[in-house]
Amino acid sequence: MDYNDDDANTISLDGNYNIQYAPTISIPTDPVCSSGETLSLNNLPSGFTATWTVSPSSYFTGSISGNGSSAFVTPLSTEIMKPCYVTFTIHETGTSWTKDYVKNFIINGPDPTLISTSVQDSYGHTPPNMSGIWLLCPNTTYYIYLNNSSSTCVTSDYTWTTPAAWTQYYHYSNYVSIYTNNQPSGTVDIYAKTCCSLTSRVKIKTQNFSQGNCGNYLTIYPNPASEIVTILLTDDFDTSVKDKSLEIFDANSNSKYKLKEFSKENTIETGSWKDGFYYVKLRYNGNDFTYTVRITH
């Protein structure tokens, strides 16, 4: 079928020596939604017929194969953001010669490879990511963002399902604010309306989290707190280490409290503090760690 080695788009001459162009597959919309879409084979050479199949077949209802250069396919509405492909096979009349033309497409939502998450703590620092798993610290506030780089399928109106051990402060636009408490590990499911689901949300991302090497030397409780905050030093904290300090700052970086003597359990009166977030800054053995506590009356 190769007529011109220098031009892959021209494949042969017909009986009148006219150039015949290579077949191409067009998909009018990206992605293909559950309402159905016609996939077309263009430039079918004269003297050829075509058949088609769509895969994986379990993702579709109705026809999954047929004859001709047009294929109307209907994805199941339960299959969200799944990669699929259509194969058009052209057959030369009177011979056994065939050739396949394949095109990939996504059904019911944006391409999952274009959906990602990013994470920052309350200071704008990005935690480590290992093999796609974000590594968080206990007793820390984070902002989790949903990023969609698709230019053809927007996502909006997000909701977030976070681990029961976390505190979810609020969500806005494409991010959620959470506090990990004593359990930074867990799974977050993100739901949104997409170009294929204008009236209902579908799950577009599942993100796993685990605990990193955070220097978990203390526990703060209760959190949120009202009148009293207790800072409990863990067994990993060696009170005999000389290079150590602990100070609490408000959101404007004003010092509210400085621990003078380190004991396993330290109680701080916060009844006169204003509602908001406060930052416990621990320096221990040459390393700095930051924890967040919320005061609400």
Image (cartoon, grey):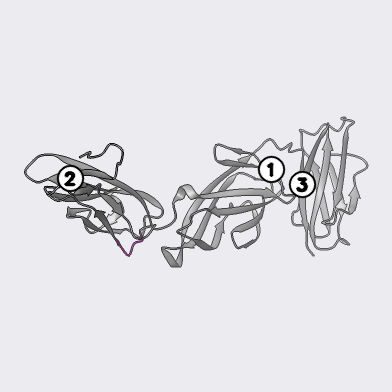
Residue annotated with mark 2? 13
* Tag in front: 3 or 2: 2
Determine crowd level at label 2: few under 14, some 14-19, many 20+ residues with C-alpha closer than 10 A: some
Marker disc for residue 192: none
- Is disc 1 surrounded by few (<14), some (14 to 19) or many (20+) residues within 10 Å? many
Q: Which residue bears the numbered disc 1?
A: 137
Which numbered disc, 3 or 2, marks the residue that appears first in the sequence? 2
Residue 199 is one of the magenta-drawn residues: no
The kind of secondary structure element at disc 3 is strand
The percent coordinates of residue 283 (x first, y second) are 84, 38
Quarter of the N terminus within the rendering? top left
**Amino acid under disc 3:** Tyr
Q: Which residues are magenta?
A: 33-37
Seen in the picture, residue 65 relative to 170 is either above or below; the reply is above
Point out residue 225 in the picture as x, y percentages from the top left corner.
Answer: 78, 57
Q: Is residue 145 left or right of residue 292?
A: left
Q: Tags 2 and 1 in contact by the CB under 8 Å rule?
A: no
Name the residue carrying label 3. 291
Identify residue type, mark 1: Cys
- Amino acid type assigned to the residue bearing label 2 in the image: Leu
The answer to which of marks 2 and 1 sits earlier in the sequence is 2
